[in-house]
Amino acid sequence: MRPKPVRIDLGGCNVTLLSGGRLRLDGGAMFGIIPKALWSRTTPADDDNCIQLACNCLLVEWQSDTARRVIIETGHGAKYSEKERRIFGIDPADWLLPTLLAGGIDPLSISDVVLTHLHFDHAGGLTHEAGGRVQPTFPRARVHVQRREFDDARANFGVMTNTYREENFAPLDAAGAWSLLDGPGVAIPAPRPGEPEIHALHTPGHTRGHQSLLVAGRDRRLLFVGDVMPTRAHVGAPYNMGYDLFPIDNRASKRRLLQRAVEEGWLLVIDHEPETPLVQAVSDGAGYRLEPLNP
Ligand SMILES: [Zn+2]
């Protein structure tokens, strides 16, 4: 049985934590320059040296405007060959759409989707196979992403092969669904002045156009961190991924986010954290640590 999704009232809007599926990736690649002797203390590896990761997603709903329903991040989706399913440990029955349907949420009711970046484990759920063709999972949604990221995805700018996949993008071209953001600012505006809105924070490093999403409720603020810090174990400054294009920039982005998170008391959702994605940042001597929260 699926666990009941966690729902948080931020004041004027509710955020629900949703599973976009699970996958496994090489532990060494996930921890970059950190020796296995260190990272394996907090994150156990399997016989193939892989670690288990979640693809956490959010649903944001406005209390004053029920027509507005925003999904942040879509997880890996279901479009994988047998070989890829084996390599990544992906269960094609476990992704965002089945999660939403199990929760009684109609994909047609989603007005907007916002993504941190367009790697396959974040954008794969944008499209799915139905009726013999690949089509948008959220047919009525505008899809918001940084223009820098969009351009890099379409030009396949990166170090990983096959992480930017046209099958996740082309059906949205045809639907005219893209909404491209130029730098930081308001990604999803408030329906009326003083009501919650979603801010895009430009957090480059993992990719050049990576953004983190801050849901600004009336009472509390919640940050979807993205791949700046993919698990709780990545809170330390040198804990960057081997996949990061610019690790030194990622480090700076992480420091800025953690500093503001502590100063302003943000809730944080950690995108690939498998067990306790909802956390609070705490200042810890020279650095920070992430403490799990029970909502
Ligand atoms: Zn990524």
Image (cartoon, grey):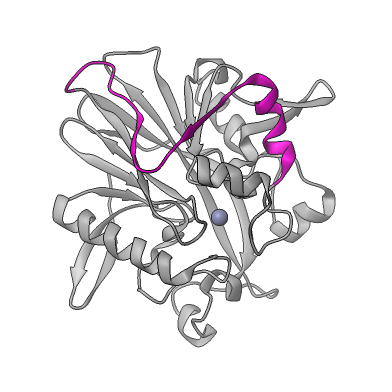
Establish if 286 lies above or below 125.
below
Range of magenta residues = 165-194
- Which of 57/196 is in front? 196
User: x%, y% of residue 248?
Assistant: 42, 72
Q: Residue at x 55, y 33 (%)?
A: 99
Q: Residue at x 51, y 81 (%)?
A: 33
82 displayed left or right of 73: right
User: x%, y% of residue 110?
Assistant: 49, 20
**Viewport quadrant of the N terminus:** top right
User: x%, y% of residue 267?
Assistant: 26, 48
Q: Residue at x 32, y 13 (%)?
A: 65
Q: Write down the quadrant of residue 5 in the picture.
A: top left
Establish if 75 lies above or below 176.
below
222 displayed left or right of 75: left
- Kindly tell me whether residue 246 is visible in this rendering: yes
Q: Residue at x 14, y 56 (%)?
A: 263
Establish if 142 lies above or below 41.
above
